[in-house]
Image (spheres, helix red, strand yellow):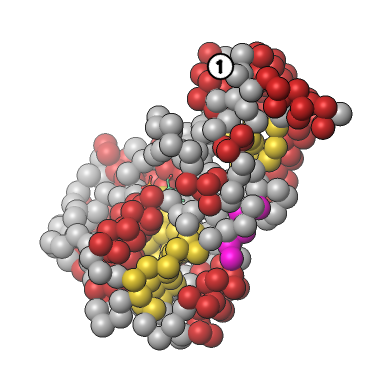
Amino acid sequence: MGLIYLDNNATTKVDPNVLEAMLPYFKEEYANPSSIYDFAKRSNHAIKEARGVIKDFFNAENEKEIIFTSCGSESANTAIRGVLNMNKNKRHIITSKVEHPCVLNVYRALEKEGYKVDYIGVNSNGELDLAQLESAIDDDTALVSIMYANNETGVIFPIEKISQIIKSKNPETKFFVDAVQVTGKIPIDVQACGVDLMSISGHKFHAPKGIGALYVNSKALITPLIIGGHQERGKRAGTENVPYIVGMARAAELAMDNLKYEATEIRRLRDKLEANILKNVFNARINAGVVNRVPNTTNIGFEYIEGELILLHLSDLGICASSGSACTSGSLEPSHVLRAMNVPFTAIHGSIRFSLSKFTTENEIDYVCEKMPSIIEKLTNISPFQDELAALKRLKH
Ligand code: PLP
């Protein structure tokens, strides 16, 4: 077996069709799209077309609501800071405890700058506490920022319902959704969901790293994060990254065509992997239960063993998975997401995320299913928690 890449929530392989669409904009069509000669009109036109595709990807009303950025983190920073700069009289903001650091750390910085912040919790299935959210919103709430799906567990939050709660409590409160982990996995519809701002990132759906987008409803005003020229209607300065914009639009078209496959085949492979591991490994548990999740993700806790050791054994077999998000792996801090879910400390350190993509094959999943029980058995045998493991084994049988 060659490389088995099951870390698609960290990043994805660039689709060859995406690369092909991009190449002319490196080789021949390299003009600055703002220049006035005919040569530049072609790259300008390519951006216009791409904006139309991304508008459809979000199901936005108007192309003017799309801003191209460099990544999901820039989109989130632009959304949060941009909304607050337009509403300087309001000082209360809300987010969840399980956001990606590109939201959570901006909120922490804002707290230091004097904002009152409410961090909404989740239950042991990873579901958001909607009652806590509802009671937190007041007349001073400028912004609520809630992710669409969690990068570590794949749990999907009920965005439409959350929007209704926010707007019924305070119609002026803006709602930003980090949709980075749902793109290409479930359909997105900003109008049906009633969100004001939404971010995506190309490298999570088979476009390259270094390109993202932000949807901003025409009624939601923001200031730019990057100030300079008049690109992106003054909302994001910097010469447009034409090849990457074209690439992300092509990836969005392919993602829209692939949604059915994602919902059926990728879900089937993920479920097969989960069912096999649960059946053959006595100390395995799914972190998130069977709540609504994106079809490609599973987060499995192996009790009384160390996740980093599992990853190293998998890596020796050419299998790529992850413990926590890519940004936190490498540190032995347990994941803030699993902590918020109250995952028992016996499983939190041994939690592994597998995330599939359209390039994942059945043979690969079968190979991982075959290898996991012996890896876990080996690590279980050297665990210092032998009495606890024996008790757990008796309980399971
Ligand atoms: N939001 C979520 C939920 C993510 O998973 C990630 C990346 O892992 C990001 C935002 C950041 O995206 P980017 O790497 O494009 O900055």
Which residue occupies 70% across, 48% down? 289
**Front position in the image: 21 or 113:** 113
Q: Is residue 233 left or right of residue 360?
A: left
Q: Is residue 338 above or below residue 108?
A: above
**Which residue ends up furthest to the front in the rendered image?**
387
- Quadrant position of residue 105: bottom left
- The front one of 296 and 163 is 163
Residue 371 appears in which quarter of the rendering?
top right
Residue 57 appears in the picture as rendered: no
The amino acid pointed to by label 1 is His
Residue sitting at 43 percent across and 31 percent down?
Answer: 332
Segment colored magenta? 125-129
Residue 26 shows in the view? yes
Position of residue 261 measured from the top left corner of the image (x, y, whole percent): 67, 45
Q: Look at the image and say whether residue 43 sits in the magenta stretch.
A: no
Residue under the point 51% across and 33% down: 323
Classify 307 as above or below 71.
Answer: above
Could you say which quadrant of the image residue 233 lies in? bottom left
Q: Secondary structure at mark 1?
A: helix
Q: Is 306 situated left or right of 275 in this image?
A: left
Question: Residue at (48%, 38%) from the top-left corner?
Answer: 334
282 displayed left or right of 314 = right
Q: Nearer the viewer, residue 371 or 105?
A: 105
Coordinates of residue 344 in the picture (x, y in percent):
62, 41
Numbered marks: total: 1
What secondary structure prevails in the magenta region?
loop
- Nearer to the camera, 260 or 96: 96
Q: Which residue is mark 1?
A: 313
Q: Quadrant of the C terminus?
A: top right
